Amino acid sequence: QVQLVESGGGSVQAGGSLRLSCAAFGYTFPRNCMGWFRQAPGKEREGVATIYTGGGTTYYADSVKGRFTISRDNVKDTLYLQMNSLKPEDTAMYYCAGDRVLGRLCGGRLSRADFGAWGQGTQVTVSS
C-alpha cells in the first residue's frame, strides 16, 4: 500500500522559511517523478514543483521560482520542499504526490491529473 506522509507545515510571518518533508512508503521512489502541489481555500489544487528522483531535474511554477527548492533523498525515500521568502499568497494546504505512471520523466508537468499517489497534506499559513 502506497503512503506519502507530509510534515513540516506551520505558521510563519511573511519573509520567513519552512521546510516540508514527505516520506514515501510502498512507492517506488527512485527514478520517478514526484512533486509538491498546494490548494488554497476556494481554489484549485496547483502544481508547485516537480523533481525526477533519478537525475534530480527540477521544474517550478513561476510563482515560486527563486524562492522554493525541491529536493530528494533516495536513501531515505524522502521528498523535501524548502520554502524561503514566504508570502501570504503561499498560504495553502501542501500535498506531496507521486507520478501516476512509474518511470517517466517529469518533463515540466505540473498537472494534478498526472499524479496518482497523494499524501494527506500539511498546512502552511503565512501572515503579513
Image: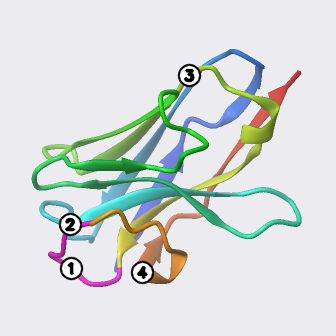
User: Do the CB atoms of the residues marked 1 and 4 lie less than 8 Å apart?
Assistant: no
Q: Residue at x 50, y 83 (%)?
A: 113
Q: Are marks 1 and 2 in contact (CB under 8 Å)?
A: yes
Count residues near mark 3 (Cα–Cα under 10 Å), then give few for <14, some for 14-19, many for 20+: some
Circles 3 and 4: CB atoms closer than 8 Å: no
Front position in the image: 97 or 87? 87
Image position, residue 12 (x, y; %): 75, 22
Identify residue type, mark 2. Asn
Q: Is residue 123 left or right of residue 98?
A: right
* Foreground label between 2 and 4: 4
Mark 2 falls on what kind of element? loop
Indicate yes or no whether the magenta region holds residue 25.
Answer: no
Mark 1 — residue? 102
Circle nearer the N terminus (3, 1): 3
Q: Secondary structure at mark 3?
A: loop
Compare marks 1 and 2 and give the one earlier in the sequence: 2
Residue identified by numbered label 2 = 32
Three-letter code, disc 1 = Leu
Question: Which residue in the protein does label 4 denote?
Answer: 114
Instruction: Determine which of the numbered discs, if any, sits on residue 84 in the image.
Output: 3
Say if mark 2 contacts mark 4, CB within 8 Å. no
Which-is-in-front pick, marks 1 and 4? 4
Amino acid carrying label 4: it is Asp
- Part of the protein shown in magenta: 100-106
Give the overall secondary structure of the magenta segment: loop
